Image (cartoon, rainbow, N blue to C red):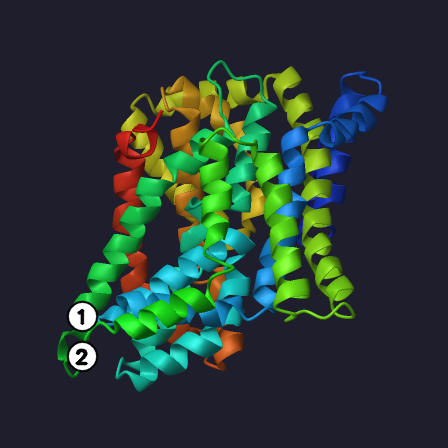
């Protein structure tokens, strides 16, 4: 009987049962086996409602969806093109910067590909870039913004880590700072590659146009303050992350609905419903995962796994290499939100036994997961791009391979150079 229930839960997961139901059932079974009152599940789920920082997730998600439904993507493309488009490989660099910024606010790389792909791929093709390069660039850069504030995965990792009573504090403010240099390194690596790819294109003789740049800045006049509000407000000590999220959501709502009127009052409930569907899924999985985490900690599962791993791996470098391979596979198979709430409670205590800082683990975890989004054969972004651009998925495999290996090299640098993530701490 003890083996039958886990096997049944595994079969249900493979058959497509909702993830929260499988996690919740496994936690209930674990508590039942150890004679713990099953009311503990309700207590753990209620804990979610008591986390002040958790309110940042629905508010930032709503702000991201409102921006996605407005004409902000077009204005973002215009301003980055005006400021960077005159550089060698400038349009490709524009695409990288726009995708990273958009993903940082929406928290979803698939949304970035769908929202910006129709703008960027034709523009790149018109500038003379090969179509395979264009497809690879947009597909791979769709997930770059996950390391930049106010990325939802960064917030969710901080929430999960804070519930584990670690000896080392893990604040969301620290995670926002820790992602700056690793995320910047990824952007720089792809920007250099894009510049090298543009060497055979006709020279871009158009100089920097100050008038167009000023016009683009004025056109983005309502969007430019957003990063200042989020980062300046948090690090200036004016308000906490949850307060920054509330101000951001209210600001975006007023701008898109009242001032610019790009989202009608009739369409607003549809946008809110779509954004809250994502939030509901995240919070439901998080709620049952907290109960599952509590059971695993009480049962000493992380310590048991660590003892098993330590029998075969004593070197932190070897552990990090194997962890990188594991996370790449995980990123292919599981969405990033589910991966965080399921795997972090297991991985984090083990990594800390090897001397890995929890903030550094968060950055390398997300860096690997965003690479997993377009890792063949089943990376999620490959199929989203295949559908969006009406191309065979094999074409996307070939298109993204150069970007995959470049970003894999940067992920290894991030993994084995912890100072890059921890320099601000």
Q: Is residue 5 visible?
A: no
Q: Is residue 74 left or right of residue 68?
A: left
* Disc 2 to disc 1, C-alpha distance: 7 Å
Q: Position of residue 224 (x, y in %)?
A: 45, 56
Q: Position of residue 312 (x, y in %)?
A: 36, 24
Q: Position of residue 384 (x, y in %)?
A: 52, 69
Q: Residue sitting at 74 percent across and 51 percent down?
A: 17
Q: Nearer the viewer, residue 329 or 236?
A: 236
The picture quadrant where one finds residue 418 is: top left
Decide: few, some or many residues near mark 2? Use Cα within 10 Å; few <14, some 14-19, many ≥20.
some
> Label for residue 367?
none
Q: Nearer the viewer, residue 74 or 276?
A: 74
Quarter occupied by the C terminus = top left
Q: Nearer the viewer, residue 415 or 58?
A: 58
Q: Which residue is mark 2?
A: 204
Answer yes or no: do the residues labelled 2 and 1 have beta carbons within 8 Å?
yes
Q: Is residue 285 left or right of residue 103?
A: right
Question: Does 204 appear above or below 15?
Answer: below
Q: Is residue 74 visible?
A: yes
Q: Residue sitting at 57 percent across and 62 percent down?
A: 67
Numbered disc 2: secondary structure: loop
Decide: few, some or many residues near mark 1? Use Cα within 10 Å; few <14, some 14-19, many ≥20.
many
Q: Position of residue 354 (x, y in %)?
A: 37, 21
Q: Residue sitting at 57 percent across and 17 percent down?
A: 165
Q: Residue sitting at 48 percent across and 79 percent down?
A: 389
Of labels 2 and 1, earlier in sequence is 1
> Label for residue 88?
1
Question: Does 274 appear above or below 219?
Answer: above
Numbered disc 1: secondary structure: loop
Q: Residue extending furthest top? A: 167
Q: Nearer the viewer, residue 293 or 12?
A: 293
The picture quadrant where one finds residue 201 is: bottom left
């Amino acid at each position: 009987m003890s083996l039958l229930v886990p096997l049944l839960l595994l079969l249900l997961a493979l058959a497509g049962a909702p993830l929260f139901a499988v996690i919740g059932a496994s936690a209930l079974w674990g508590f039942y086996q150890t004679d713990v009152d099953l009311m503990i599940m309700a207590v753990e789920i209620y804990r979610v409602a008591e986390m002040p920082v958790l309110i940042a997730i629905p508010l930032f998600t709503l702000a991201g969806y409102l921006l996605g439904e407005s004409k902000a993507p077009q204005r973002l493309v215009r301003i980055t093109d005006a400021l960077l488009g005159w550089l060698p490989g400038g349009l490709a660099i524009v695409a990288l910067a726009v995708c990273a910024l958009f993903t940082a606010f929406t928290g979803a790389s698939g949304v970035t590909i769908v929202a910006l792909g129709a703008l960027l791929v034709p523009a790149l093709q018109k500038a003379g870039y090969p179509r395979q390069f264009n497809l690879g660039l947009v597909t791979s850069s769709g997930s770059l913004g996950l390391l930049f504030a106010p990325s939802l995965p960064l917030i969710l990792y901080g929430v999960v880590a804070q519930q584990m009573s670690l000896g080392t504090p893990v604040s969301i403010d620290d995670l926002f700072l820790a992602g700056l240099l690793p995320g910047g390194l990824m952007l720089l690596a792809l920007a250099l590659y894009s510049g090298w790819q543009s060497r055979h294109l006709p020279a871009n003789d158009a100089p920097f146009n100050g008038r167009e740049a000023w016009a683009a800045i004025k056109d983005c006049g309502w969007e430019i303050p957003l990063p200042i509000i989020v980062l300046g407000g948090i690090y200036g000590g004016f308000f906490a992350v949850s307060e920054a999220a509330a101000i951001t959501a209210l600001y975006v709502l007023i701008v898109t609905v009242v001032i610019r009127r790009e989202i009608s009052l009739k369409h607003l409930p549809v946008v809110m419903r779509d954004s809250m569907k994502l939030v509901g899924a995240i919070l439901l999985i998080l709620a049952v995962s907290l109960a599952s985490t509590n059971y695993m900690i009480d049962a000493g599962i992380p310590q048991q796994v660590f003892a098993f791993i330590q029998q075969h791996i004593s070197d932190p470098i070897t552990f990090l290499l194997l962890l990188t391979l594991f996370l790449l596979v995980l990123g292919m198979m599981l969405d990033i939100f589910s991966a965080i709430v399921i795997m972090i409670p297991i991985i984090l205590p083990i990594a800390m036994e090897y001397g890995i800082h929890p903030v550094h683990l968060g950055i390398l975890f997300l860096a690997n997961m965003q690479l997993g989004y377009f890792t063949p054969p089943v990376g999620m972004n490959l199929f989203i791009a295949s559908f969006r651009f009406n191309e065979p998925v094999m074409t996307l495999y070939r298109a993204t391979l150069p970007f995959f290996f470049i970003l894999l090299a940067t992920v290894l640098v991030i993994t084995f150079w912890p100072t890059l993530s921890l320099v601000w701490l």
